[in-house]
Image (spheres, rainbow, N blue to C red):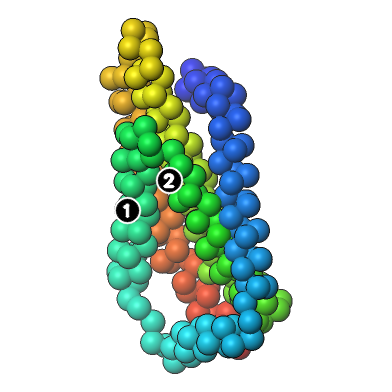
Amino acid sequence: MKQREFILFHHLKQHATSYLFMLVLFLIGIIFGAIVVNSMNFTQKEDLFYYLERFFAKLQQGQVISKQEILQSSFLAHLKFLLFLYVLGLSIIGIPIIWMLLFSKGLMMGFSVGFLVNQLGWKGLTLAAAAVAPQNLVVIPLYLIAGTSAMLFSVTLLRKLIAKRSPLSLRRYFFQYSTIFLVLIAGSAAASIIETFLANPLLSMLVNDLL
């Protein structure tokens, strides 16, 4: 156990700059998402809020999607995103796309929370905390690790290509890279379970209490 902790600590220390870069990129995406909300005109906000009200009305009437559908849809969404990052990591030219994907995830989160707060004030903040926060406490670290791992493996491929006699063992790195993503996929299943059995029921309860 101590050896694994040492390996993990060494890995984080060695690649701290890369993880920090991806975190800052994600946070910038969140900030831009909030800015987009403030830049929308009144008509655009009203149109979007109309669809949000219809969704809330369905929740109040008990017209909810089955837990099985939510679980399946959530897990497939995470799986597709992680597999896409995995494939991009196998490509030297995938690094800019990896950055764009992490930025876009932050952008969507910032927009979602920002729009709810903009339209509903503290009630919107409460609903956002219920709908977004629980599963994203797991999802955000998973995506940051996935994006950073993909970027690092892509850089490793580039170094191997430039220095053809490099002592780097691609087989070992590929095995580590694949193992990381298998663990992340398992973690995304846990995030989907949290979203299905905690976030959605909590959101339904708060919608009935607050709206």
At x 36%, y 24%, the residue is 157
Q: Secondary structure at mark 1?
A: helix
Q: Position of residue 59 (x, y in %)?
A: 46, 85
Task: Pick out the residue farthest to the right.
Answer: 122
- Report the residue marked by disc 2: 97
Q: Amino acid at mark 1?
A: Lys
Which is more toward the observer, 25 or 205? 25
- In the rendered image, the vertical position of residue 146 relative to residue 168, given as above or below: below
- In the rendered image, the vertical position of residue 14 relative to residue 127, given as above or below: above
* Other residues around mark 2 within 10 Å, as few (<14) / some (14–19) / many (≥20): some
* Other residues around mark 1 within 10 Å, as few (<14) / some (14–19) / many (≥20): few
Which is more toward the observer, 70 or 14? 14
Q: Amino acid at mark 2?
A: Ile
At x 59%, y 88%, the residue is 43
Q: Is residue 69 left or right of residue 138?
A: left
For residue 32, which quarter of the picture? bottom right
- Report the residue marked by disc 1: 80
For residue 16, which quarter of the picture? top right
Q: Secondary structure at mark 2?
A: helix
Residue 103 is labelled as none
- In the rendered image, the vertical position of residue 211 relative to residue 178, given as above or below: below
How far apart, in angstroms, are the residues tagged by discs 1 and 2?
15 Å
* The C terminus - image quarter: bottom right
Q: Position of residue 184 (x, y in %)?
A: 39, 42
Q: Position of residue 90 (x, y in %)?
A: 32, 34
Tell me which label, 1 or 2, sits earlier in the chain: 1
